Image (cartoon, rainbow, N blue to C red):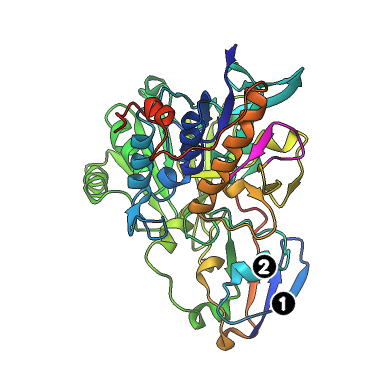
Amino acid sequence: MAKITYITNDNQTHEINVQNGLTVMEGAVQNDIPGIDADCGGGMACATCHVYVKEDWLNKLPKKEDGEEDMLDMAFEPKKNSRLSCQIIVSDELDGLIVNIPSKQA
Amino acid sequence: MNKTDALIIGAGPTGLFTAHQLKLIGLDCEVVDNLDKIGGQCIELYPDKPIYDIPAVPECTGEELTNNLINQLKPFDIRFHLKERVDEVKKENNNWIVKTNSGKIFATPNVIIAGGVGSFEPRKFSPKDCEKFENRSIFYSIKDKSIFKGKTVTIFGGGDSALDWAVELSSDSYVNLVHRRDEFRAAQATVDKVHELVKAKKINLFTKYQMIGVKGSKKLESIDIKHDNEKTKNIKTDYVLGFFGLIMQLGPIANWGLNINKKTIEVDTEKFETNQKGIYAVGDICSYPGKLKLILSGFHEGALAARACFKLARPNEKYRFEFTTSSKTIKNRLGVKGD
């Protein structure tokens, strides 16, 4: 279990306890956090679960797989700290993770 | 006006197998899809990715699955209307009148929505002002390349479409290619070609840049791009092309009076009918307790929705359940010899 903080574009903060093994995307979708569409359902095929990871967490997350950076080319306003939330699997080590949700997914 | 027993919206795997089921039980159907090819998400999003959970098919790619489904439809005469988006669905007596964005009209007692997560539309630039130049100076697809001759064209993107067009247009136009990072995801041969053309000064390459604004009153004059290091540049350009792939949008379906919850349409699990009689939803776009977004679930849902269509399409006949292994009628429809 890890506490994940999702900050929406209008600065609403949602602190959610997400079970280990779920993805950061699933934690958002199952708790009705707005702004994460996840159209393809976690297949790394649509770039609509795009989040910005708080800088100090960037290096603590498991590295991007091949293909994630390619998909991020299609994301809305990608930045250096962009990730696809469907590719971040929750574990105890991620307790305290903060992600910002972009203004739009497309 | 096209009259048919059932109109299927969406030519993905679920739509294709639903068409198969309709034809098997002796109903006519036509299929509409906004993409320019058959296959839906399988062909657009993951043609090369392996799928491991199609019953009796240990492994196949999105493209292989699509081709197999198309093969399975070979015995039947089914009209596909590609590059058409259904915009309007209205009830008229016992029929639904369905209109597409290009003006095609269908009359049918049954509409089956197999629309996945919606129709595929191009992803667009983020600055709001881009909208006012859209389809005049800013494009997301190319219909007539002759307009670019002798002009400055700025292309955004790092995939095959962006690079192919950069190469193609560099012979007759001044081409700027802008991408958010140094690596490209296009075919290696195209990437090599682009680097050659950059060296030969045929293409101006800007990497680690993104669009932040457009300038011009009546006509597009220039655009502002920003580097990862926050520095901005203004480049003069006549045209801008953006190739960021496609995104799925529910679009007009939202206006058809259906019960929609979180971009999915509520259905019953007997007929997969929506709150509107004669409109069904199957595959990823439908929701009911226990719904799994698997291709195999879409097949099951399509098979049941097809049987439900029979009642409205043939009100004076009774549907008889038959097996393909033994039914002569079905074998005739399939064009195979019975034994």
Q: Image quadrant of residue B249?
A: top right
Residue occupying the point 54% across, 48% down: B300
Report crowding for label 1: few under 14, some 14 to 19, many 20 or more residues within 10 A (C-alpha): some
Residue holding disc 1: A16
The rendered magenta stretch, by its main secondary structure, is classed as loop
The answer to whether mark 2 and mark 1 are in CB contact below 8 A is: yes
Residue holding disc 2: A28
Mark with earlier residue (2, 1):
1
The range drawn in magenta is B273-282
Viewer-proximal residue among B137 and B17: B17
> Mark 2: which amino acid?
Ala
The chain holding disc 2 is A
Q: Which residue extends farthest front?
A: B339
Q: Decide if residue B194 is on the left or right side of residue B128.
A: left
Q: Pinpoint residue B17: horizontal percent, then vertical percent.
A: 47, 39
Q: Image quadrant of residue B72?
A: top left
Q: Is residue B107 visible?
A: yes
> Mark 1: which amino acid?
Ile
Magenta highlight on residue B275: yes
Residue occupying the point 36% across, 22% down: B149
Magenta highlight on residue B304: no
